[in-house]
Amino acid sequence: MEIIPLRPGFGAELRGVTLADVAADDAVYADVRKAFEDYSVLLFRGQDVTDEGQLAFSRRFGPPEVTKVGSLGTGSHFVILTTIGPDGKVVPADHRYALRNRANQLWHTDSSFKSLPALTSVLSARIMPDHGGETEFVSTRLAFERLDSALREKLENSYAWHSYAYSRGKIAVGLATAEELAALPPQCWRLVWRNPVNGRGSLYIASHTYAIEGMEPAAGEKLISELMAAVPARGLSYEHRWHSGDVVMWDNRATMHRGRPWPANEARYMVRTTISATAADGLEAMRPPPRLAAE
Ligand code: OGA
Ligand code: MN
């Protein structure tokens, strides 16, 4: 396996390894897992991608999420991100599918609004637009490490609230349905996720983050927007231009990502598998004191 770094300090393309190798071979998985802990974003090119193969690969990293209500693929282990409607035609720009893609164009990490957050997401492009439609990544680990030590310490001992309704509300009123709201109450997590393998901390924030526990709402929003702005600073993002056979996985503990726009009349079809975080991934230290979790 060859590791080709993509950006200073994060992101790597892995060569000489297939998804099937990882699924079948413990030693290959161990090497890829090490690269995942080190680089946060991994790119595999030229893969022979099937739903089953993507899921078998993903399962190596932990338990797969079951897709939530209101998403395409609900009840399965797959999230379908598409602009192709049930009639096979590209949906109009104000269609729910298109608006969901727009919500994914806000910087975020996946599943911080769920009661069980995600370790990693694995994404494959099945139909790509001719222009645009890239997926861009930034390291919230490098962003955290750039902060001064007093702020790092304060953040490490702070908790933030995450809500699906909040991030969807930025795109369109009612984009989150009553069914989704009922299934997805706000969640509170520590603001810094410490990786138990290498000890490095990352900011754990996203488009879903709306309040800091114990801070006045306005002051909390100000801090959140300052942190959100600090993460992609310095132009150190990795923007992935999708080609057929590409698979990208990312560490939701240590990165944010966003989709990039593409012409509304062009089809795009992506398939995501998502793996829940476990105690071995540092999840327990993320939980707030019981007093907060119960709110
Ligand atoms: C995702 C996501 C962005 C994109 O799959 O979680 O945010 O480029 N995707 O489609
Ligand atoms: Mn996402």
Image (cartoon, grey):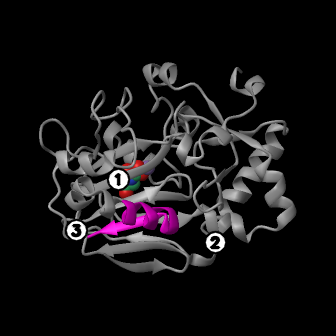
Q: Main secondary structure of the magenta part?
A: helix
Specify the amino acid type for callout 2.
Answer: Ala
Q: Where are the magenta residues, as a range?
A: 30-45
Q: Nearer the viewer, residue 6 or 88?
A: 6
Q: Which residue is mark 1?
A: 122
Q: Position of residue 279 (x, y in %)?
A: 56, 40
Mark closer to the observer (2, 1):
1
Residue 36 rendering spot, x and y as whole percentages:
45, 63
Contact check, label 1 and label 3, Cβ < 8 Å: no
Q: What amino acid type should be assigned to the residue bearing mark 1?
A: Val
Does the closest atom of ligand 1 sit within 8 Å of the Cβ of label 1? no
- Looking at the image, residue 72 sits to the left or right of residue 166; the answer is left
Label 2 – label 1 distance at C-alpha: 25 Å
Q: Secondary structure at mark 2?
A: helix
Residue 44 part of the magenta-drawn span: yes
Are the residues tagged 3 and 2 within 8 Å (C-beta)?
no
Q: Which residue is mark 3?
A: 130
Label at residue 233? 2
At 25% from the left and 69% from the top, the residue drawn is 17
Is residue 261 among the parts visible in the rendering?
Answer: no
**Residue at (19%, 50%) from the top-left corner?**
53
